[in-house]
Amino acid sequence: MTADFRHFYQKTWAERTAIVAEQAQLTPAERALFKKYYLPEHHQIIENYLTDYPLPMGLAVNFVVDGQAKVVPMVTEEPSVIAAASNGAKIVKRAGGFKTTLNQREMIGQIVLEQLTAPAETAAVIEAHQAELLRVADAAHPSLKKRGGGARRIRTRVLGQGYLSVDLFVDVQAAMGANMLNTMLEAVAKSIGVLTKTDPLMSILSNFATASLVKAECAIPVALLQAGRYSGKLVAAKIAAASTVAQIDPYRATTHNKGIMNGIDAVAIATGNDWRALESGAHAYAAKDGHYRGMSSWTSDGQTLRGTLSIPLPVGIVGGSIKINELAQLNQRLLQVDQAGDLARIIAAVGLAQNLAALRALVTTGIQQGHMHLQLKSLALAAGATPAELPAVLQQLELAPQQDLATTQRLITALRQ
Ligand code: NDP
């Protein structure tokens, strides 16, 4: 029989879980998982809520950012991410820590006009009414201005094919600001419609957050980079070479940047921030000159390895689901941040630490050696090893010619006999 999902959003939680259980023929044990992770208040966050989906949260250590020691909560399902961040941060700590720069923290929203026969003239009309339009924007969300934020300026861009983008720059204070900005944009779009006798196509913030850039930097004496048989000077040269490859080859750049985002997303999730917004903005910024490149760059003069990461990080410490997410609030306390910009600075440092650790491993021992122990642990658990069986399974797995699920299951079965 097919379960009935009509009006699912109107059903109670008990009704929803019963429908799903029927549809998927769930066992009582499977059905109990809905209850196990259920948090009633999360009905307020998403639609058609069933249960929560737990992810591990851990703490990266050793960070020094702008002279302040920091520990960094990270939420990730990937082994080695927290170890690598802590490892990269430890090296940089010995070199004096990360320095960050944040000149501006504004969000940009777009009102797109279409079917314009003279877009430059329409743009001129809009620019001439900038002060009035900024007042309309502020009036749509007055509390922001009271807090010291608000609409700052308007820019117009002729996109071609009859389209014009009117970009509104807003100081969103402690929030990420997506909803606040969207409210302001819709109000401004109405005024622009009247002013230009057009019907704006759409109004929405842009995740290409080029007015929320953060730069993290570090300068590491090469001696601190020595790894096994590799001298620090050689490691520094190889890291710089790896950085060059990420600048010229999109295949490498993508993986280089994935490693950076391993750290950035993990802190974004831990602090209740919209990691999809950060991801889209970061990758767009990595392709800002028309060629997708590594987000960080490393250079070595033989004495010092210098790393830098510039990235848009429109994060908030209020707004979105943060106010009803106790762990996001707890994690702000662990990070000891009371300004959104300070959170952005730490996140940029995490991205650079993550990148340093990954590159150092890649150009010396290879990534697998460090990863493998944790990966094997995940494999053993996935194959059904109990915590008590883990040490013995891992010992045998490390020696096994094949380290796959079938082999691991065979090892566990043998151990149990
Ligand atoms: P909210 O809509 O929650 O707005 C921010 C809230 O924080 C407001 O209620 C504001 O109060 C309150 N606030 C309290 N103190 C401050 C302060 N010091 N500075 C600023 N605000 C303060 O969140 P955002 O506007 O930040 O939007 C973020 C959410 O939007 C995220 O969940 C994101 O996923 C989502 N989103 C993202 C989009 C995208 O990325 N493309 C598109 C649409 C939504 P008050 O009302 O009194 O001003």
Image (tube, helix red, strand yellow):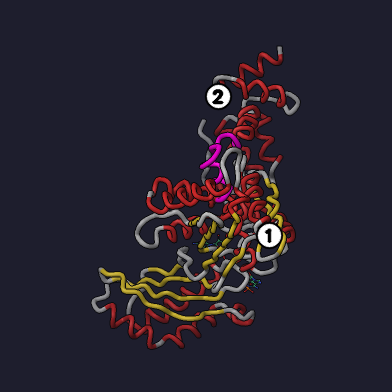
The local secondary structure at tag 2 comes to: loop
Q: Position of residue 84 (x, y in %)?
A: 62, 46
Quickly name the residue at label 2: 404
Between 258 and 36, the one nearer to me in the picture: 258
Is residue 51 something one can see in this rendering? no
Relative side of 383 to 308, left or right: right
* Real-space CA distance between mark 2 and mark 1, rounded to the nearest whole angstrom: 39 Å
Question: Which residues, given as a range, are shown in magenta?
Answer: 356-371
Q: Which mark is residue 377?
A: none
Residue that badge 1 annotates: 64
Viewer-nearest residue: 87 or 123: 87
Kind of residue indicated by mark 2: Asp
Residue 395 in view here: yes
**Which residue occupies the extreme left position in the image?**
117
Task: Tell me: 416 left or right of 224.
Answer: right
Identify which amino acid the numbered label 1 is placed on.
Val
Q: Earlier in the sequence, mark 2 or mark 1?
A: 1
Is residue 148 within the magenta segment?
no
Q: Residues within 10 Å of mark 1 (few under 14, many from 20)?
A: many
Residue 189 percent location from the top left of the image: 42, 76
Dot 2 surroundings within 10 Å: few (below 14), some, or many (20 or more)?
some
